[in-house]
Structure formats: structure tokens, C-alpha cells
Amino acid sequence: MSMHLLAGAVAPAAHASLAAGGIGGSGRAGATVIALVGLAGVVVGGLALRRSRRGPGEGRVQALVAAAAGLVSLVLSVWHLALTTEGLGSGQGRAGAVAGVVFGLIGAVLGGLALARSRRTA
């Protein structure tokens, strides 16, 4: 079987599964993981913000991790919402993706605030 025939047989099936279930297969699982990444960004961002109050340079790595986790969660959640077609309660994970957007935004903001605070000189 040539590579073009294989790609032609696999690509429509992959596109259909993404369109029907969003990111991560069944929909709920992918959206839940994305929301948990965003929640981790919120927790790490809060810790980084608290640590950044100690002085300049404190909590910088945690702030970068929180900002990165928040942005990843935000982007993947928006992508998931764009790929799913049904409404809330349909089993496609839209509620988890909405939570991922909220957690991702909060985590990115907390990470950014902690990063800005860690750069200040005393």
C-alpha cells in the first residue's frame, strides 16, 4: 500500500474523531486533563506570588511554570471548544474546556504577576 493511500484512509478518520470528541479522544478525558493543567497553573501561580513577596528573584521558576501551564491550558481549551459541536451536557467535555479556559487565564495572570514581582529590585 502506498503512503498516499494510507494517508487518505487515516486522515478522514482522525479528523472525524477530533471533530466529534475534541482533544483527547472521548472529549471528557481530554478536557479534564486540560482543566487539571490549568488548575495546577493556578496553584503554582499562587505559590509563586507568595514566594515573590520575599524578595527579588524569588519564585521566578514557579512563575514561569504557572504562566506556561496557564497558557497551554487556555490555548488547548479554546481549541477543544472550537472542535466540539454539541452543547454542555453532551459528553464532549465542553464544561471541562470552559473550566480549562478559566483556570488557564487565572494561572497565566498569577504567573505573570509573580514574574513581574520577582524582577523588581528592593
Image: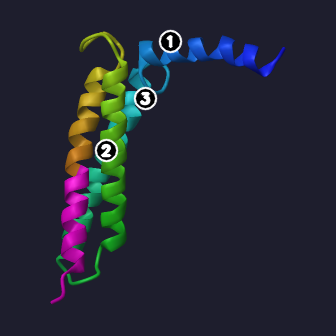
In the image, residue 115 lies in the stretch drawn in magenta: yes
- Residue 115's place in the image compared with 111, above or below, is below
Give the residue type at disc 3.
Gly
**Which quarter of the figure has residue 68?**
bottom left
Q: Residue 30 carries which label?
A: 3
**In this view of the protein, can residue 38 be seen by the observer?**
yes
Q: Which residue lies at the image location 67% right of the left edge and 11% below the top edge?
A: 9
Which residues fall within the magenta stretch? 107-122
- Number of numbered discs overlaid on the protein picture: 3
87 versus 80 height, above or below: above
Left or right of 16, for residue 59: left
Is the residue marked by circle 2 packed among few (<14), some (14-19), or many (20+) residues within 10 Å?
many
Q: Name the residue under label 1.
A: 16
Q: Residue 75 lies in what quarter of the image?
A: top left
Label 1 element class: helix
Residue 38, image x, y percentages: 31, 44
In the image, residue 24 lies in the stretch drawn in magenta: no
Marks 3 and 1, how far apart at CA: 16 Å
Per the image, the residue denoted by label 2 is: 38
Q: Which amino acid does label 2 sit on?
A: Gly
Which residue is nearer to you in this view: 83 or 27?
83
Give the crowd class for mark 3: few <14, some 14-19, many >=20 residues within 10 Å: many
Which residue corresponds to the image point at 18% horizontal and 82% vertical from the top-left? 120
Q: Is tag 3's residue or tag 1's residue first in the polypeptide sequence?
A: 1
Reading the chain from its start, which is encountered first: label 3 or label 2? 3
Say if residue 46 shows up in the picture.
no
Dividing the picture into quarters, in which one does residue 116 lie?
A: bottom left
> Separation of disc 1 and disc 2 at Cα?
27 Å
Q: What residue type is labelled 1?
A: Ala
| SS under mark 2 | helix
